[in-house]
Amino acid sequence: MLIEQVENPKITGAKENIVRLTMTLDQFRNLKDCVSLAWQSAEKDSRMFLITTMIREDFVNLTIDDKKDKEQAKRALL
């Protein structure tokens, strides 16, 4: 895991910290499963629901080599 400070694209002159994670594809898939389970069990008006919804959308938008996983994730959001 690496923490980097980068320019904020929305606010000129501002910087923000980002975290870069390195993991195997298996670890990535397990993380996606954990996020999906947390999303399914979260109350609709809860903070956990909002956070897991954002993370799930990020997983769908990621470009990964396994197109099958990407298609399944898109269908899960619909």
Image: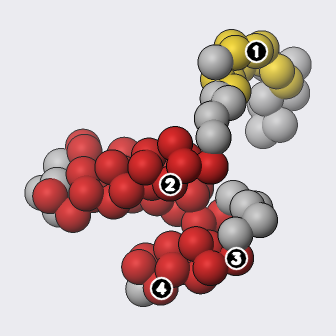
Q: What residue is pinned by disc 1?
A: 4
Q: Considering only order in the chain, which callout, 4 or 1, is on the residue closer to the N terminus?
A: 1
Q: Of the numbered discs in the image, which one, if any, rests on residue 75? A: 4
Q: Of the numbered discs in the image, which one, if any, rests on residue 16? A: none
Q: In the image, is residue 71 above or below residue 42?
A: below
Q: What element carries label 4?
A: helix
Q: Considering only order in the chain, which callout, 2 or 4, is on the residue closer to the N terminus?
A: 2
Mark 1 or 4, closer to the camera:
4
Mark 4 or 2, closer to the camera:
2
Q: Residue at x 18, y 49 (%)?
A: 46
Q: Decide which of 1, 6 is in the foreground and name it.
A: 1
Q: What residue is pinned by disc 2?
A: 29
10 Å crowding of disc 4: few (<14), some (14-19), many (20+):
few
Between the C-alphas of marks 4 and 2, the distance is 16 Å
Q: What residue is pinned by disc 3?
A: 67
Q: Considering only order in the chain, which callout, 2 or 1, is on the residue closer to the N terminus?
A: 1
Residue 49 visible in the snapshot? no
Q: What residue type is labelled 3?
A: Lys
Between the C-alphas of marks 4 and 3, the distance is 12 Å
Between the C-alphas of marks 1 and 4, the distance is 33 Å
